[in-house]
Image (cartoon, grey):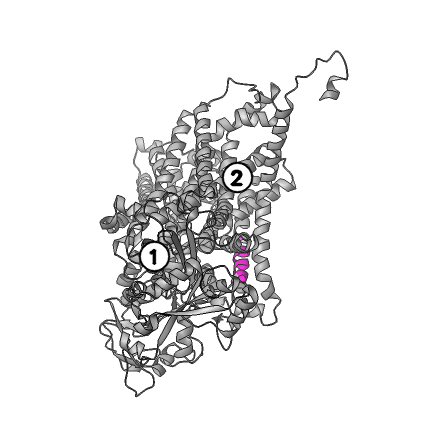
Amino acid sequence: MSPPPVTPVSARFTRTPLVVRKERQQAAVRLVLLAMAVLMVLPLLAIISHLIIQAWPALSWEFLVDVPRRGMTEGGIWPALVGTVYLVVISLAVSAPIGVLAAIYLNEYARDNWFTRAINLAVISLAGVPSIVHALFGLGAFVYAARFGYSILAASLTLAIMTLPVIIASTREALAAVPAAFREACWNVGATRWQTIRAIVLPNSISGILTGVILQVSRAAGETAPILFTGAVFFKAVQRGDLFPYRLTDQCMALSMHLYTVSTQVPNVREAIPWATAVVLLGAVLAVNAAAIALRVWLRNRKRW
Amino acid sequence: MASTSSTGAAVPPRPTRPRRAVWGERGIELLIYASGVSAIVFILAILFFIFREAAPVLFSDRFSLTQFLFSTEWYPTSVSNVRYGTLALSAGTLAVTVLAMILAVPFGVGGAVFLSQFCGPRLRETLKIIIELLAAIPSVVWGFIGLTVMSRLIVTYTGAPVGVNVLNGGIILALMSVPIIVSIGEDALKAVPDSYVEAALALGVTRWQLVFRVLLPAARHGLLAAVLLGVGRAIGETMAVLMATGHAVQIPHGILDSVRTLTANIAAELGEAPAGSEHYQVLFLTGVLLFAITMLVNLAADLIIRGARARK
Amino acid sequence: MMGHPVSGTRPDRPTWAIAATALLAALAVLAACGGGGPQSQTTTIQNKGSDTMVNVAQAWAEAYKLAAPAVDVEVSGGGSGVGIAALIRGTVDIATSSRNMKPEEIEQARRHTGQTPKEIIVGYDALAVYVHKSNPLEAVSNEQLAEIFGEGGATVNWAQLGVAIPGVTDDTIVRVSRQSSSGTYEFFRDHVLGKRDFKLGSRDMNGSKEVVELVGSTPTAIGYSGMGYATPAVKMLRISPKTGEEPVAPSVENTLNKSYPLARSLQLYTLGEPQGAVKAYVAWILSDAGQQILAESGYVPLPPEQRRQ
């Protein structure tokens, strides 16, 4: 919708002072706004490069697979890395199915009435709940009321509820992008509502749904507050490279929490370790996001309608 | 189905599906309905559980709601005189949020205008991807940057004694809110009807006039909603402000004072408050307060967005 | 299976397959977590409590993994009060604490769990008062500290203490404290402020390390933390119990002979006599190996005669 290139017709004939002023003004505005946009982009580049420079001495394969050593002042981040994977996988295994089904309900089944509006309101409110309030909820509901104790289970469920509204919203958007004519065609040959969803709506929107879910992977991996009081520990002794060091009822270390502890709690930690932890966390999050974006772009280009 | 086919011989019998498929479908649809209401269930559950933990203190005669809201004295573990006043914490939240918005709104709106009006499709796509990545940086990483890089910069350039303060938290929160404001703001600008733009261009306006006289006024509701969502994010943010604002319970007198926000206070003390104690309950009450504030802000934003949509 | 009424329009079949595979993979991992692979024969010891001790508790857990690979120790901080509260609820095996359990807490634990908490002293710590290394101040008295930190205290500038900090124009004292209800905060309040409250507006840091780091980067700051947290950027002050008395430096000897006024014991609490894996772990902590780690973490180990219990 951006307007056609503005070459004032009059300029081709005469460059009156008014026109010149207008052009200058326009160039100035563009410059100012460009500077603003660059200023938004700059922090990302500056942050990433600074982090990598500071982290460089510690970054290695060893750092990823080794356990923290000498009072967490040396060694690697393996237990935190695995802990984050556990939390992310379990929380999304809960929130993705519920979120996708909820979006199917809202987009394919729900009528426009007060009840649907109430659900929409709830989704919006849920998305706005601060992460620390999710932490309070997780502590009150899962740790104490449901008697899961401080555990991976309680932390993952807390994260699941936090990611749910965004999954619902993104899935809905993907479902809504499927043209109504597709559904109508399917109904007209006698398919039921669910058959239509399964055979037409989901296959045509799965890329969008997946993108939304993948984006929540990075969100769940990066959150700290909700797991701080529900299942993340300062330290847990784990074998180097052990793939399954935790049970569902155990507490675990997590990358985000580990970054917080090594940067604020652990004395005399090797200079580069907090930076390297930040780089791994940021790298994982950005890589997942980039993957989701790439997936989206690729599938958008393949789209046939 | 059986009854339909028995009404008349002229109607050919409808093809029936295997019973298992029918029941399977019903099962799936039941799941869909159940998931559909899950959002309502969860939001009520959150309200219920944080309120349940907070409730006992509300009815305790040692606790005064007026003190809770309007006293600056926060002494949750005092031996002689326990006081739970959150005014200094609310002031901290307010100060950091306002500063963040002062910094983020011009950049956010400017960025949205630039994206929608002043750049080609390729540059726009690139910028949007970068902004999306900026939004994905975890808050604990932001906090770490505030604690290390930003605090050193602030001490060097402002001469402040301590680098973790309102300014630090404000800059970090601004960087975190800008992506939201840009993406929602761009949507709002995109939603301005083409006819407005075309009419303005036909009158020979410059891009500058187009933006300030036509686009911004026409999209003002959407932009306001974008700003409100940014505010909601800033108020609710925890880890970044926990690490970057300096943990001082006081009403700030300038942007170089350290403060503590409502969210940071919960994060700092919840781990230390034995479950079920009065201190623990007061922290949950703070959670109820935060929940109420962010919910109001978000609902206001939603109402504005939908109001703007309905008008079209 | 249901029929596909319009099989002509089924794009993205491969994506479907990807999605299904991803879901299956997720479920497989989930099952693996739930099923508990090789670790089901290991024992987990949950250890929670004091922020002061969290680092040494972590170092113990780390070293004990090598000494006894079949035992996993989980360490969380939170504060002494939290560890004790968890012990009262019976949800941890070991509570670490930098303060003693109060009689009513012991009573609560008996009521909830039917067992009497057992106290095991594992070492000592000196709470040091830190200033920036450029600060010319060398010693301070308890009363002066109370005037700086306590509610209603009159000292707000370094000039009031007769100290001029080089290269600083604004000499307002930056007070660095700990968040309320950490054991360290309570200890300082009880032993320095005489149970009065702190002045508001101090920087109440979340961990001992943060205190020392902030003091180390702020010439006008003063803060308190365990002496194990000292860095080259800070200086520990000598402390006189009363104005006019000889100031005492925080050190191992002065802690053990109790001449340093801000010395305290560090202890573990278990429910009843420790049993099984916990018993072995505690014995190991009290052994030379465990005490060596405690000393390396910057605390004061038990004198040899106290080690065997």
Report x, y in % for residue B286: 52, 61
**Residue lying furthest bottom:** C244
Vertical order, C111 against C151 (above or below): above
Image quarter for residue B122? Answer: top left
Mark closer to the observer (2, 1): 1
Magenta region: B284-294
Q: Considering the image in quadrants, where does the C terminus of chain B appear?
A: top right
Which residue was labeled with disc 2? Answer: A99
- Please name whichever residue, C284 or C198, is drawn nearer the observer in this view of the structure: C284
Report x, y in % for residue B79: 49, 76
Image quarter for residue B197? Answer: top left
Question: Residue drawn 32% across and 49% down?
Answer: A77
Please name the amino acid that badge 1 sits on. Tyr
Please name the amino acid that badge 2 sits on. Gly
**Chain ID for label 1?**
C
Tell me, yes or no, if residue B35 can be seen here. Answer: yes
Report x, y in % for residue A266: 32, 60
**Chain ID for label 2?**
A
Which residue was labeled with disc 1? Answer: C64
